[in-house]
Image (tube, helix red, strand yellow):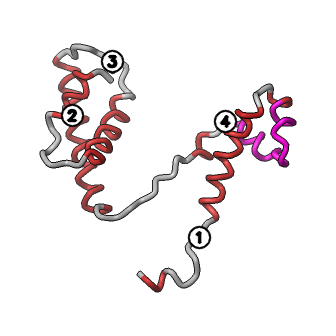
């Protein structure tokens, strides 16, 4: 995304937003803009600016809704690693038995890359299984 394209959002953001809120708005806006092949124009034409303006309005509405619903709370957004694993990576994680070298040889990867893939998958699995501790629900 070019600075000119990002400026369309900046022009619509309300004053007084925290840096984190601005970052969330940019992420929402960029996610929409990435779906359009026109993205990347140093000097966006009028029709693209109109589309970007509509995307910016949606991003601002989404940010306001998030702030109303989740504002003041700490939330954790999982990366959703398991959802994005390729079929090869899923199979590798299922086959993992503690030896990174074996999988590295089998899948023609470095042991470090296998460690990254399996580690991300294991972290996701742990977080998914990790429920709230008994009795803590009563304290809120």
Q: Is residue 135 above or below residue 100?
A: below
Q: Is 95 colored magenta in this rendering?
A: yes
Q: Secondary structure at mark 3?
A: loop
Residue at numbered disc 1 = 131
Q: Report x, y in % for residue 48.
A: 23, 21
Q: Residues within 10 Å of mark 1 (few under 14, many from 20)?
A: few
Please state which of the two labelled residues, at mark 2 or mark 4, is closer to the viewer: 2
Picture coordinates of residue 28, whole percent (x, y): 33, 40
User: Disc 4 on helix, strand or loop?
Assistant: loop
Q: CA distance from mark 1 to mark 3?
A: 43 Å
Whichever of callouts 2 and 3 sits on the residue coming sooner in the sequence is: 2
Answer with left or right where residue 29 lies relative to residue 137. Answer: left
Q: Which residues are magenta?
A: 87-104
Asked whether, in this view, residue 81 is left or right of residue 113, the answer is left
Label 4 Cα crowd, 10 Å radius (few <14 / some 14-19 / many 20+) = few
In this rendering, the label closer to the viewer, 1 or 4: 1
- The residue shown at (18%, 26%) is 50
Q: Which residue carries the number 3 mark?
A: 40
Decide whether residue 92 is among the magenta residues. yes
Answer whether labels 1 and 3 touch (C-beta < 8 Å): no
Disc nearer the start of the sequence (2/4): 2
In the picture, the disc for residue 86 is 4
Quadrant of the image occupied by residue 120: top right
């Amino acid at each position: 995304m070019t600075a000119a394209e990002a400026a369309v959002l900046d022009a619509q953001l309300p004053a007084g937003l925290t840096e984190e809120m601005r970052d969330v708005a940019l992420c929402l806006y960029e996610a929409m803009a990435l779906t359009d092949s026109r993205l990347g124009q140093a000097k966006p034409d009028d029709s693209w600016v109109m589309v970007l303006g509509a995307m910016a309005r949606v991003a601002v509405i989404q940010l306001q809704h998030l702030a109303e619903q989740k504002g003041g709370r700490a939330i954790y957004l999982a990366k959703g690693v398991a959802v994005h694993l390729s079929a090869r990576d899923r199979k590798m994680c299922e086959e993992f038995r503690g030896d990174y070298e074996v999988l590295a040889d089998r899948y023609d990867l470095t042991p470090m890359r296998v460690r990254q893939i399996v580690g991300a998958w294991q972290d996701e699995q742990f977080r998914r299984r990790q429920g709230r501790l008994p009795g803590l629900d009563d304290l809120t």
